[in-house]
Amino acid sequence: MNFIDQERLEKSPYVQLLTLGLYAIAGIILASLASVLSLYFWYGEMFNADWLNPGHPKNLVTMRIFIGMQQIGLFLLPALVLAWGEKQRVPEFYGFKKVKVELLLLVILMMVFSMPILEWVTMVNMKMVLPGFLKPVEEWMRAQEDKNTETMVNLLKINDIGDYLISILLIAILPAIAEEMIFRGAIQRSLGRMFQNPHFVIWFTAFIFSAIHIQFYGFLPRLLLGAAFGYIYFWTQSLWYSMFAHFVNNAYAVTGAWYMQKNNIPLSEANKTTNFQWYGVLISVILTFLVFKYFKNKSLKADGKQLDKSI
């Protein structure tokens, strides 16, 4: 089973990845300029770096604009331009096939059943300790993580339904579309043309996906999520399902943050303890594996492809 069915000659996957990187660099520059201009029109004054500090009164709007523009410039536009550069329509290039409700329901089950696993892995990752000689590196990583946590806590302040919908748009909908387009759609697709081993391609793409977020103490759960999204895309050959899985995961996080604030629970405490006993995690592993297996069988049969027992 190949990652893509080649109906026309494309550029080399090496060229595709190189140009994708160049598009991403250009995209982040354009996104930064667009963010600064947007803030100028919003506030009537030029952007000040102090606005990026979580305690600044203009931080929330600033971060919302920067994050939204970054998703578009760094992830979405490069993936779109890559397809246009191959003179192909985006739905055909990345495989936006007709959605089957049964598979969407299975995606929801997969994400729900996997939550105890991800919570446990997150807790383990948060407790990671480096060897003594790497103490300066660990201290830098901790400082970066604290800064990222402070920024995210500020970004997830939800006072009303309007704030909730904005958070869903910026943290669930936009990343689900933009990040899946570039990571599963563009990068995994190109790597799939370079290497014959789909497991290597999926996990390597997941590694890039997790590493680019530069959140060291969330690396492992994001790696697992990236691999899950990769297998979903590989089996269905459609980005709709990996996008939906990505959305469900992120929307759950936003909704959980809203619930915590409604009940006066500090967001900074979210990943420091687990609500599941060891047997709950074990049950989660078993149920997630079974649903993934069933999803694989249903998606490949629905696509009329022969089942590969090794994948």
Image (cartoon, rainbow, N blue to C red):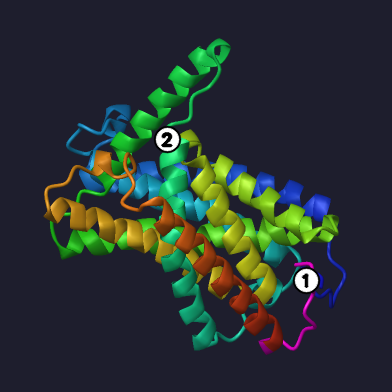
Give the residue at the far front of this rendering. Answer: 279
| Whole-number angstrom distance, CA of label 1 to CA of label 2 | 37 Å
Is residue 182 visible from the viewing direction of this image? no
Residue 78: mark: none
Closer to the camera, 11 or 290?
A: 290
Look at 17% across and 65% down and name the residue there.
161
Task: Where is residue 177? Give x, y as percent.
Answer: 50, 64
- Find residue 272 and report its horizontal and vertical position in percent: 32, 39
The residue at the point 50 percent across, 69 percent down is 287
- The quarter of the rendered structure image containing the N terminus is bottom right
Camera-side residue: 135 or 239? 135
The residue carrying pointer 1 sits among few (fewer than 14), some (14 to 19) or many (20 or more) residues within 10 Å by Cα, namely some
Q: x%, y% of residue 179? A: 53, 57
150 is higher (above) or lower (below) than 306:
above
Residue 112 appears in the rendering: yes
Residue type beneath disc 2: Met
- Residue drawn at x 53%, y 43% as measured from the top left: 220
Question: Alpha-carbon neighbours of circle 2 within 10 Å: few (<14), some, or many (≥20)?
Answer: some
Residue extent of the magenta highlight: 302-311
Q: Residue, x 47% and y 37% (percent of image)? A: 125
Placement of 285 over or under 88, stated as above or below: above
User: Which amino acid does the dot numbered 1 rest on?
Assistant: Ile
Q: Is residue 178 above or below residue 244?
A: above
Q: Nearer the viewer, residue 245 or 265?
A: 265
**In this rendering, the label closer to the viewer, 1 or 2:** 2
In this rendering, is residue 81 above or below 264? below
Figure quadrant of the C terminus: bottom right
Mark 2: which secondary structure? helix
Circle 2 is placed at which residue position?
126
The residue under label 1 is: 4
Q: Secondary structure at mark 1?
A: loop
